[in-house]
């Protein structure tokens, strides 16, 4: 079993480890920390084999000496479902409002305010998918995702400490239907060591995008791939 300091990532040597109390001391930054959870995790099932996923179009990766950066160009990586639905929704609402105006039923327009706001949001989200680039950055001190130039109400920027992360995994979910058939998207979620599951990035239109992001994060953080409840996995 090999330990590293959760603060500075320096290796911890055997003479600074108390296996009875599961406490260790870092001689580099003098941090004293517990490693009981990591110690117990060695009893988990071994990692599974999975095929290497090649980089899909619309994603760029920089492998630097001390940093990994994954760039997602949403114009190439997201479904057009949001834009199509936004156009359909706003056309329907616009025709309904026009009919009410022509009939003189102005009081009923108040009923349509929530539908108008929903249409504005759908257009806003669609524009975000056309112009946005998401940046996933991983180094020894952080794992972060930032969305530029638009992030408000679409996908929010998030930051995590690497030592909090137990596993990355892919989740498949429905975002609507077309002609009675469900439309699916994929997300990359994180399982934290405290048991909490949090989304990292979502609305990816194809499985290989999510698989590639998961693969690169786990490779960089040296996380052995293991099954997670609720994940979508294909051999």
Image (spheres, rainbow, N blue to C red):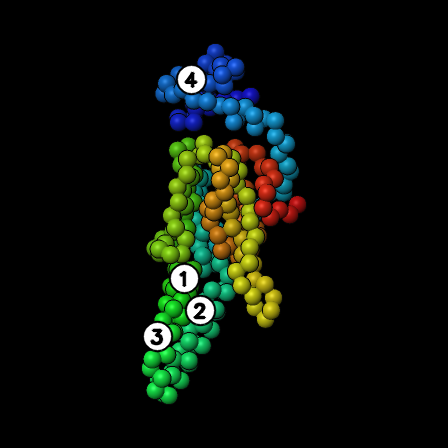
Residue that label 2 marks:
86
- The reply to whether discs 1 and 3 touch (Cβ–Cβ < 8 Å) is no
Q: Position of residue 45 (x, y in %)?
A: 63, 32
> On the image, numbered disc 1 is attached to which residue?
125
Mark 2 residue crowding within 10 angstroms, few (<14) / some (14–19) / many (20+): many
Q: Earlier in the sequence, mark 2 or mark 3?
A: 2
| Secondary element type, mark 3 | helix
* Residue that label 4 marks: 25
Please, what secondary structure does the residue beneath circle 2 have? helix
Q: Quadrant of residue 127?
A: bottom left
Structural distance between the alpha carbons of marks 1 and 2: 9 Å
Tag 1 or tag 4, which sits nearer the N-term?
A: 4
The nearer-to-camera label among 3 and 4 is: 3
How crowded pointer 4 is (Cα within 10 Å; few <14, some 14-19, many 20+) is rated as many
Image quarter in which the C terminus is found: top right
Question: In the current view of this chain or complex, which residue is farthest to the bottom?
Answer: 103
Say which element carries label 1: helix
Q: Nearer the viewer, residue 224 or 62?
A: 224
Residue visible at 40% across and 56% down?
Answer: 154
- Label 3: few (<14), some or many (≥20) within 10 Å? few
Using the image, tell me which numbered label, if any, was put on residue 110.
3
Q: CA distance from mark 4 to mark 2?
A: 56 Å
The reply to whether callout 2 and callout 3 are in contact (CB within 8 Å) is: no
């Amino acid at each position: 079993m090999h330990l590293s300091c959760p603060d500075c990532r320096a290796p911890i040597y055997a003479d600074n480890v108390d296996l009875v109390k599961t406490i260790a001391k870092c001689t580099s930054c003098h941090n004293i920390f517990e490693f009981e959870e990591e110690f117990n995790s060695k009893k988990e099932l071994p990692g599974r084999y999975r095929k290497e996923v090649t980089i899909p179009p619309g994603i760029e990766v920089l492998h630097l000496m001390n940093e990994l950066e994954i760039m997602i160009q949403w114009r190439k990586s997201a479904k057009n479902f949001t834009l199509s639905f936004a156009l359909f929704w706003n056309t329907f609402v616009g025709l309904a409002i026009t009919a009410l105006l022509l009939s003189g039923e102005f009081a009923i327009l108040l009923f349509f305010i929530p539908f108008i706001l929903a249409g504005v949001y759908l257009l806003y989200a669609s524009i975000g998918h056309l112009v946005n680039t998401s940046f996933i950055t991983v180094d020894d001190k952080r794992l972060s995702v930032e969305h530029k130039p638009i992030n408000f109400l679409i996908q929010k920027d998030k930051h995590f400490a690497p030592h909090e992360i137990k596993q990355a995994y892919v989740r498949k979910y429905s975002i609507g239907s077309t002609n009675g058939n469900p439309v699916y998207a994929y997300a990359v979620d994180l399982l934290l060591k405290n048991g909490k599951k949090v989304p990292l990035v979502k609305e990816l239109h194809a499985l290989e995008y999510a698989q590639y992001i998961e693969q690169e994060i786990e490779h960089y953080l040296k996380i052995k791939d293991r099954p997670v409840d609720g994940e979508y996995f294909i051999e």
